[in-house]
Image (cartoon, rainbow, N blue to C red):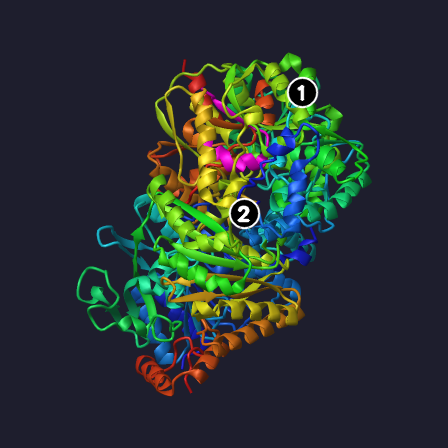
Amino acid sequence: MRTLLFTCYACEEYCPFGNHPFYLIVERQEEKGILPAPRPIITMWINQCQPIGRFMVGKVAERTLSYCFLAQFNTLVKGKLFDGIASSSIFGQEFFCNAVYLHYAKASVIKGRLPKIVENVKNQGIKELVCLHDECYGTFTSLAPAYGIDVPFKPIHYYEFLYDRLKALNDEIKPLNVKVAYQRNCSARLCPEIDHYVDDIFGLLGVERVKREYDRENALCCAEIFRMAKGPALADDIQKRNIDDMVKFGAKYCVLNCPACWDSLAHKVVRQGIKPIHMIDLCRLAIGEEQALNLSESVAEV
Amino acid sequence: MMTTSTLYDSLVKIVGKDFVSNQKEERYFYGRDGGLMPPHEPDFVVMPKTAEEVQEIVKLANNEKVPLVPKGSGLALTGLVIPQRGGVVLDMKRMDRILEVNEKARYVVVEAGVTHGVLKSYLQKHHPRLRHSLPDSPPVATIVANAVIHGQGRLSQQHGFNSDMVSGLEVVLPTGELCRIGSCSVSSYWFSKGPPLPDLSGLFLGWFGTTGIITRLGLKLYPCKKMRDVMVFLADRAELVPDIMLRLSHTEMVEDVIISAQPLPLRFKGTFWIMAYITGDSDEELEFKRKMIWGALWEYFESRDVGLLSTSPQMKAPLLSMPSKDTAKFADVAKGGGFQYAGPITPIEKFPAFIRKLEEVATKYNVFYASTTRLIGAGHCMMFSFSFSFNRANTDEMARAKKALDECSKFALEEGGVLWKADIYEQKLLMDKMDPNTLVLMKKLKQLLDPNGIMNPGNWEVR
Amino acid sequence: MQEYASQIHRCFRCGYCKFPTDYSSFNCPSYKRFKFDSYSTGGRLWLIYAWLKGEIEWSEHFAEILYTCTTCKNCTEQCPMRFAPDIVDWIVGARSDMVEKGKIPTRVARFFEAVYGYGNPFKQLRGDRAAWANGTKKYAPEDEYLLYVGCLGSYDENGQKMARCLVDILNALGVSFGILGEEEECCGNEIYMLGETGLFQNLMEKNSQKFKELGVSKVITLCPHGYNTMKNVYPTLGGNFEVYHYTQILNDLMQKNKLKLSPAKAKITYQDPCFLGRYNNIYEEPRQILQSIPGIKLVEMERNRRDAFCCGGGSGNFVTDLLAGSVDSPARVRAREAYETGADTLAVACPSCLTMLTDAAKAENLDGKLAVKDISQILKELLSVK
């Protein structure tokens, strides 16, 4: 089970009966003491996201943005798309969705921490939580219910939010007329019902999603979890196939949904002449604003 | 014996009025450093510009039996340039010329006040294929002072202490003569600090300015590749770390190996962060090195004892910056502007015992702690730091940090380590343990070179 | 500001504050000038802490150390610690304590007296404040902008040239503006930086009240010092007006091709004023103006933008001149650096930089080799040649 499982979440999406096979596998792994990743890596993740009673919140309102524990959203959340809501945000360990522990066979950590996370969100008076990462959305719509954890607020995927905002700003949209490769991340498979928004948004933006091999249900994840779990060979192979696929089908941009995918792939796609861009930034370009999240210039100082 | 005002006038005559101070403010600042050693103020601070001015100051000091303390930037944190007996502090910063870079022999000759930061910037701009071993002390640290204390830097895993990379010296002896040490004493080239001549550099390196004032230094330069990367491995069993260090250095692919251990921020808790730095002129070269390093640690990876932390370029940026600002930032952990560390040099097998001791002492004295270990000379030894941060506005906290340091220093000595940049108390501990004939030799050398005992007195005082 | 007393011990004297980003040379003006570590930011902070603890007593020398800081913010930019944004505030806080105790250098005391008594640090008559103006129209409520000239623009010879040039350009562009003339008060930026908070409060209130009475909604400042204080500090009084530095207005209009200029053949380098650059992140607009001039080649000094080396005029030093008297006086260092680029013109966007660097170029015997001009002067020269 350790050697064959890659924690890509695909089975969770593929199961037509909603039996949550992936969550069950993770529970069995933990029962059997299987380490899908090296022990110190798991320790680091468990410690890093441990709630510490420090609530990092903006002007929280009934509808609020969740940054989860991803600092890139500090850069991404700006401009007209976030008018009226930019200052309403929650961030940090106290609101961390914990879905990442699915990669590390730590269902116990999820079960232990998630109820408190949900309570923390509720105690902020939030009625609608706009999840800027679909691991959070997947956690509140799939993982929490699977573990019998009641979620007393409405999770909204940020794609739905972006779509609504773009409709409201329709007059300001200038079609981008570019070909893009969409990088479908692992946690998108926890909430496949959201996928249509990708095409809906691209339609509004005048963006062509290239029909490449590794997309939609056949998507390859960013593979960095594999590097941590299995070593470099598999991760490099998957990333190469994925990026070659983007190049082959003439993509000019690689649209990323997930900041972790950004960290894994952005600097690699750029070497193949493809521009990395987060979905929020793609929407921003279409309404005449500038890309906010960019690769930093200094990568390897000597 | 001159009066103070006459001494002042004499110093003004040598360096000029703008570069002598006997004001309280300068005496206050130069009488302290950022560590925990008690202050002692000098009578004067002077800033000479040339070796000739240094010679005149030394001759004056000899005549008047006035202590002299040559100073770089005072970043050793162990009070090595705090003038224990007052006298004159020579701030060497005005001697700031980079005199020569010999690309074909790969060395640079600098004056005593040239900082690591300036040299780094200069080489990047004018000689981008060459680099030197940059320490992680702030960039204002001087090359000479860092060599004098046997500092280590980014190339120490491959090439030893930064003092091993010295390729020649110009020194003003305590009696005022100016002499050259190494190949530069017989040749216009500064390619060697000793061989094939008798190696006299050992009379000055490591002596903390008690045997003379270095006015120029030759430093070896090394190939500077176009790209640099870091692989961050995590382990959680201290007993595995020595073997990990040996395996990494066995590859002969790694520029630098640093191990960090600290309880906070939480992501560090319970793990050792082993950072292996690699450089290359091409992606292929870096990829090959990564492969070799993976291969060296594969057994531990398969047993799940060691993992690689995936890091994006943005996450790597602070790890790759030279010098690393994180070193200085540790001083603000306690929001107090202070840290000091005991960094004994020791065989790498001592790592587990030292980590245990660090955690035990930090708990005992309730102080913030961290540790950084750097491999030196392909695994011949390591620098292990027992680092404690303290709040300068809290005397109790400072006292506890000092006790913690003292206990760690004693422990390290008992375990066979040798204390690095030892403060005056640690110097005594070392000398108490030292071979008696070695001590005699040290005393003889000091008396020979510095008969009036004017050079940084209080340091390496053999009784 | 008194919060500094509980925080100032946090300085580790690591020395990062002495450098620019690439560590190529010393970038702290007072440290470059005087070289003793006491004159670096770390030295200053440690000495302030010592003074607070009673370990050192006030002295003229201590005061000199404190007041030779030009508050250029290089230290804030480079300090790796979390308190970095507060460093200048700490120094200003310590200065305000000294002012309260009446313990300041004589030259600084004279600066305060002059502003208090005459409304400007030059001790020139209030009635002469508009002597430069040559009939420039006074502000009326129907004007879009108030052009706030400041003390240097009103009284300093170099500053007056700037002011006249800017007026001509604004007129050529058809910008709707007026000035306050003799009714203008000192903006107070230097007074604030020097720690005279009472006088600063008074000046700020007077200016804010005047703006309110006149219905001013937009202000263009000649000087980045005035820009800084009106943009960042005046709003605390509830003032509701927009503030622009003149380069922002000109750049906007020039990008829309509103200004017709004759081409010029010149190699220009540009000095980033501290109060425009590090204080307010305005680096590109002045450059865009220069690059819009046909025939101009813009070359950069090695230390530019956030790493620019201060001219040494900040914190009132364009009057008190506490950093003068050496080849390593900051303005002279900068003039040499500008000359080394091969430029024939050193462009500035600040009357303090203009006056400091003009004098420095003379001291460096660069007359005839390096012209020091404000951007407004460069544009005016090309405007008049048709």
Q: Examine the rendering and report whether any part of residue A72 can be seen.
A: yes
Q: Are marks 1 and 2 on the same chain?
A: no
Name the amino acid, label 1: Tyr
Numbered circle sitting on residue C70: 2
Name the amino acid, label 2: Thr
Residue drawn at x 50%, y 70% as measured from the top left: B78
In the rendered image, residue A256, in percent from the top left (x then y), is placed at: 56, 29
Q: What residue does disc 1 label?
A: A163
Residue drawn at x 34%, y 43% as measured from the top left: B285
Dot 1 falls on a residue whose secondary structure is: helix
Residue drawn at x 51%, y 21% as measured from the top left: A180
- Please indicate whether residue C313 sits to the left or right of residue A204 in the image: left
What span is in magenta? Answer: A250-269
Give the vertical position of A276 relative to B171 (above or below): above
Q: Chain under label 2? A: C
Of labels 1 and 2, the one closer to you: 1
In the rendered image, residue B51, in percent from the top left (x then y), is placed at: 30, 65
Q: Chain under label 1? A: A
Q: Quadrant of the C terminus of chain B?
A: bottom left
Q: Examine the rendering and report whether any part of residue A88 can be seen.
A: no
Q: Quadrant of the N terminus of chain B?
A: bottom left
Residue A257: within the magenta? yes
